[in-house]
Amino acid sequence: MATNPNLDLSLYLVSDSTPEILGDKDICQVVEQACKGGVTIVQYRDKHAETSVLIKTATKLHSITKKYNVPLLINDRLDVCLAVGAEGVHIGQDDTPLEAVRSMLPSNAIVGVTASSMEEAEAAIQGGADYLGIGTMFATPTKKDTKSIIGTRGTQEILTRCKTGTKHSVGCVAIGSINAANVQRVIHQSTAGENRLNGVAVVSAIMAAADPQGAASELLQRVKNAPEKFYISTRPGSEVASDKGMFEHIPGIIQKHVSSSVLSHNMTNTVVQNFAANVCLATGASPIMSMNGAEAPDLAQLGGGLVINMGTITPDIMNAYQAGVKAYNAAGNPVLLDPVGGGATSVRRQAIQTLLKAGFYDVIKGNEGEIGAVMGSANIQQRGVDSGPSSSSAQQKVEMVKSLAQKERCLVLMTGATDYLSDGTRTAAISNGSKWLGKITGSGCALGSVVVSYLALHRDDKFVAAMAGILHYELAAERAEQHASCRGPGSFIPAFLDELYLIGQDITSVNVSKLARVEFL
Ligand SMILES: Nc1ncnc2c1ncn2[C@@H]1O[C@H](COP(=O)(O)OP(=O)(O)OP(=O)(O)O)[C@@H](O)[C@H]1O
Ligand SMILES: Cc1ncsc1CCO
């Protein structure tokens, strides 16, 4: 929490007056509209105007913000702040030093500091800043001197080490290309344990909006609702199923899935499209294999889930994938990232980073090499899309999925003869399945298509939803392997499709808790 209890950083407007952003609108009118919409703090920033103009505009702005009980801060210019009696200043790393600012302003003045690294954040805290403006979150046209784009990962790191356990706890806002579409996932993904952003700072999302009041009110609502929209595993307010207790729910979830026709939207590789679509149909989902980013916003409205699979990426496809995750994040529907072959080439390693920056994934699923690549392990060298022999112990795999789930604040599923599923708190090893799954192409990709439709269907607990999808898939594989006709990978596939369908029809007579070979760790 911010030191100053009156400092509400929920929605921080940086009122930039550059013509590219403001257009021909009047800055004072826009700020007044924004105050009506609910911004909680305003900063006046103009790097170029003459002092007399700054004072004139700041005076007008202050008379507006006072009406709405909103503090006005001046970017960098102490003299302007003192001249108009504004509530404080915001300084960057290249501006007047913090100690000097503090000594010249009244003791109750608010002083905020931009920080884009741990060192800068720690120095600002030691120097007595009231809040940190953390960024730059994403590349932004309003700030040409973006020293470092730190994203949600960099923000999370600063929050981890700066926000608690320090003598002076400070408020934190993130800044840099934050808008209504990404604000909630930015807050979710930046969170580090108990430490979360107190709010976000925006420029264009309000200053360039046709309706600044409406834009501010929507942003504020989204900031407040962020924990409900994006959560790691269990929806706030839902009951958390005990480890073994979750098997009681799973037959009911499978039964519901079988008759749901829930959408499984696959932006997937060209190798598995047909197989994955048949797997979806056999489990009761309705598949669409669409690689066109332009139609993702429409499809995202249909209540289903999206698979983003890197199997056969090209530069065009990467653009479509980024549009896809953005559309589904905005709609609040689940997305699964399958970084196929992520450890095979430098193009794929880079693609993982690009996709992670583009949005939030409810599940990151891959084999051992792929999960290692997402974790940034330089030692991983996949020969192709398959893992090759495992190089880690079971305990190391548990640690991998758990720590990645905690870092990315999502579910992580590492497949193999034994699958490891974690939400950072609950971790399970699932030893069901068939050896033939490892001998056909696309069994991991198709599992992703199933898991995402289960997540779309069962929203209260993503861990339980994923477990239901995995068991549907792997128990069907076990039954297929028993078919007299199943003599190898070729004859396994039709038997597997049959059993995906039949186990769904029979689910009330299947003793899932007895058949599940699941160990909670
Ligand atoms: N030896 C095995 N025994 C049991 N199940 C297996 C075995 N090998 C793989 N599986 C199962 O197959 C599914 C896919 O896992 P796998 O790790 O083979 O995916 P993958 O390498 O990503 O596949 P692909 O890239 O071909 O889609 C999982 O459900 C997994 O449990
Ligand atoms: C074989 C193969 N190559 C690219 S994607 C794919 C399908 C399995 O992932």
Image: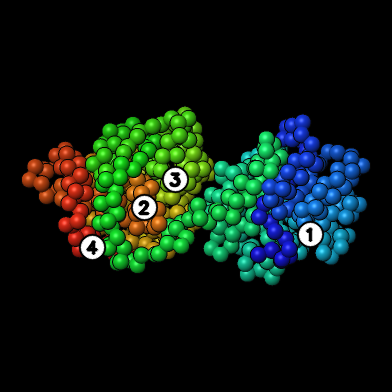
Question: Is 167 situated above or below 487?
Answer: below
**What residue does disc 3 label?**
333
Residue that carries the numbered disc 4 in the rendered image = 513
* Closer to the camera in the image, 466 or 442: 466
In the picture, measured across the screen, residue 269 lies left or right of residue 228, that is left
Q: Secondary structure at mark 3?
A: loop
* N-term mark: 4 or 2: 2
Mark 1 or mark 2: name the one nearer the start of the chain.
1
Q: Amino acid at mark 2?
A: His
Q: Residues within 10 Å of mark 4 (few under 14, many from 20)?
A: some
Q: Amino acid at mark 3?
A: Asn
Q: In the image, 223: left or right of 480?
A: right
Circle on res. 110: 1
Q: Amino acid at mark 4?
A: Ser
Q: Tell me the kind of residue under disc 1.
A: Ile
Q: Residue at x 28, y 62 (%)?
A: 247
How crowded pointer 3 is (Cα within 10 Å; few <14, some 14-19, many 20+) is rated as many
Q: Which residue is mark 2?
A: 458
Disc 2 residue lies near ligand 1 with CB under 8 A: no
Q: Work out whether mark 3 precedes mark 2 in sequence or the reverse, and give the earlier one.
A: 3
Disc on the earlier residue, 3 or 4: 3
Q: Are marks 4 and 2 in contact (CB under 8 Å)?
A: no
Residue at image coords 76%, 64%: 128
Q: Which corner quadrant of the image does residue 385 belong to?
A: top left
Q: Secondary structure at mark 2?
A: loop
